[in-house]
Image: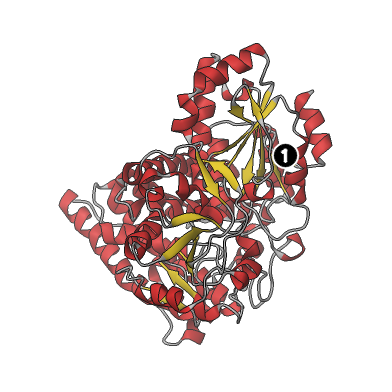
């Protein structure tokens, strides 16, 4: 088998991609990414043991996070870049091993003799590395461990990958936590165990959820500490006349640096996709040339980028195969790579992007103005908590629906639009992540001055939803599961897996997940989740609404 990948929702036939993937990842790139994970496990085996002895190395920690993030869906498609991660991994593993052995010597204990991924040595050629990657890919474990155990292992791994992405976002803004790194290494070390028990696997999935909660809290502190608390903001979603740059992905710091470098140059900057919430942060929206938002979710970028009259900057995951019409004006930065696409290095010098914007026509005229309201993070919502609580007590608000998560290509995602439109007028919709683009431009009105649609931000802002739910539960002196709150979630890739595990760790029950269940969730694994959490696949909007409101 040339490849096997089932880490995202768009796997072919719901089982796994066996040749070039839907996302555009080649079998060669997939194999190299599998080998990166294998190499990282070797590093973390030493780093985990060093951490238990009170030692860590920031370079080791950062490498593991960045290497895992590079393997998340729609991040790094460049085999040369991934190969460099592998070559660097050998030096980092040696550093991790030395750290562990020095800690043992300091404590007067003998170091363990580790095998498996700690002994991996890179092949001399890329073809050799690709072959090594194929040897450590998923199908081999199907044969030795079965699909259920392998599926649970991948559930943990994908949760760790999603958490690594959020850790990287926090790191670039100066927020980190030694215990979080230690747990990441411990989780990767656990995945190296042979014949793990199902109960241990489920237990570790919950630990990943706990870890991700801590990391989302770190990221929230990073974003708000640097850029201020998001505040309710009306955002223009139609273009204005002038030269233009479009910024997509998730990284607030990249946008901030671009805004600084473009100030006074006569260039308008627009957000795209998951960058929409940036327009609610005081220290970003203060730039007058951050004029609004363009387009919808990531999966529409081929059409939207083709029509955008200027350069596009991809800051994190979400890139899909660039089309010829805009390939010479799309740029990547951070860990994002696509072969043949210009890359802005770690110095974040956006000069080439600015020159491209000035050379392109920009928008010839203003489009008719249209605005939407965003910025309902936990600070904003809890600021009016007394009104919300009173509205619930008076019966003005009957129910809350959290409708959010990742969007994607898969047919059937119109479910979320139909569901949102079917929600009764005495109910409030909370939303976050790019799934909101299915309905966030619709007018849902208000209840007693409270907007019926509250946009809480990016996927990582699930932390805001958790904070709000916890505060409401405290106000009503009940558990979160006793609130008039239902979660209708859409998933796509590994960040969504990490958030799902966090919600499960918190004991949230009765969640509905779609449009399809993950391929790595086998029937036996699903039974475990149903028994413990009553997690269920979506049906039809009307069936689900009737069941919830009954």
Give the crowd class for mark 1: few <14, some 14-19, many >=20 residues within 10 Å. many
- Whether residue 114 is visible: no
Q: Quadrant of residue 416?
A: top right
Image height of 256 relative to 347, above or below: above
| Foreground residue among 362 and 137 | 362
Q: What colour scheme was applied to this rendering of the protein?
A: secondary structure
Q: Which residue is mark 1?
A: 420
Image height of 475 relative to 366, above or below: above
Which percent across, then down, holds residue 375?
A: 50, 40
Q: Is residue 78 left or right of residue 258?
A: right
Q: Is residue 548 left or right of residue 254?
A: right
- In the current view of this chain or complex, which residue is farthest to the front? 365
- In the current view of this chain or complex, which residue is farthest to the left? 106
Secondary structure of the residue carrying tag 1 is helix
| Foreground residue among 201 and 22 | 22
Q: Is residue 86 left or right of residue 476?
A: left
The residue at the point 22 percent across, 51 percent down is 109
- Whether residue 62 is visible: yes
């Amino acid at each position: 088998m040339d490849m096997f990948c089932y880490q995202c929702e768009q796997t072919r036939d719901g089982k796994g991609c066996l040749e070039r993937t839907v996302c555009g990842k080649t079998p060669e790139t997939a194999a190299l990414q599998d080998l990166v994970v294998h190499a990282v496990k070797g590093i973390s085996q030493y780093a985990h043991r060093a951490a238990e002895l009170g030692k860590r190395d920031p370079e080791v920690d950062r490498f593991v996070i960045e290497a895992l993030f590079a393997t998340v869906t729609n991040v790094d498609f460049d085999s040369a870049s991934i190969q460099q991660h592998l070559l660097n991994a050998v030096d980092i593993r040696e550093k991790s091993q030395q750290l562990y052995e020095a800690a043992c010597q300091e404590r007067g204990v003998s170091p363990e003799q580790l095998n498996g991924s700690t002994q991996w040595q890179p092949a001399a050629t890329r073809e050799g590395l690709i072959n090594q990657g194929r040897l450590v890919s998923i199908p081999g474990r199907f044969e030795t461990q079965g699909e259920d155990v392998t599926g649970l292992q991948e559930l943990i791994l994908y949760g760790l990958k999603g958490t690594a992405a959020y850790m990287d976002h926090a790191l670039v803004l100066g927020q980190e936590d030694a215990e979080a790194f230690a747990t990441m290494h411990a989780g990767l070390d656990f995945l190296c165990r042979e014949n793990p028990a199902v109960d241990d696997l489920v237990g570790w999935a919950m630990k990943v959820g706990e870890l991700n909660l801590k990391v989302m809290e770190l990221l929230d502190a990073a974003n708000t500490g640097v850029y201020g608390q998001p505040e309710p903001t009306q955002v223009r979603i139609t273009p204005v006349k002038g030269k233009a740059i479009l910024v997509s992905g998730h990284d607030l710091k990249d946008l901030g640096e671009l805004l600084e470098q473009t100030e006074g140059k006569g260039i308008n900057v627009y957000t795209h996709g998951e960058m929409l919430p940036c327009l609610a942060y005081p220290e970003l929206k203060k730039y007058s040339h951050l004029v609004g938002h363009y387009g919808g979710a990531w999966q529409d970028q081929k059409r939207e980028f083709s029509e955008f009259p200027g350069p596009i900057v991809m800051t994190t995951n979400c890139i899909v195969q660039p089309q010829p019409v805009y390939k010479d004006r799309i740029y990547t930065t951070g860990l994002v790579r696509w072969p043949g696409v210009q890359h802005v290095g770690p110095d974040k010098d956006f000069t080439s992007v600015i020159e491209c914007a000035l050379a392109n026509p920009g928008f010839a005229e203003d489009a008719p103005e249209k605005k939407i309201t965003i910025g309902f993070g936990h600070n904003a919502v809890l600021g009016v908590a007394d009104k919300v609580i009173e509205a619930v007590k008076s019966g003005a608000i009957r129910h809350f629906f959290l409708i959010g998560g990742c969007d994607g290509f898969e047919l059937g995602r119109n479910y979320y639009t139909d569901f949102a439109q079917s929600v009764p007028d005495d109910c409030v919709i909370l939303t976050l992540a790019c799934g909101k683009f299915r309905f966030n431009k619709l007018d849902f009105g208000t209840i007693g001055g409270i907007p019926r649609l509250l946009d809480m931000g990016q996927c990582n802002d699930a932390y805001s939803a958790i904070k709000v739910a916890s505060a409401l539960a405290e106000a009503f002196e009940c558990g979160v599961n006793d609130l008039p709150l239902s979660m209708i979630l859409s998933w796509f890739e590994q960040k969504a897996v990490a958030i799902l595990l966090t919600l499960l760790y918190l004991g949230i029950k009765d969640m509905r997940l779609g449009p399809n269940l993950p391929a790595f969730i086998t029937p036996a694994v699903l039974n475990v989740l149903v028994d413990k959490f009553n997690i269920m696949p979506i049906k039809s909007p009307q069936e689900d609404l009737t069941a919830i409101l009954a």
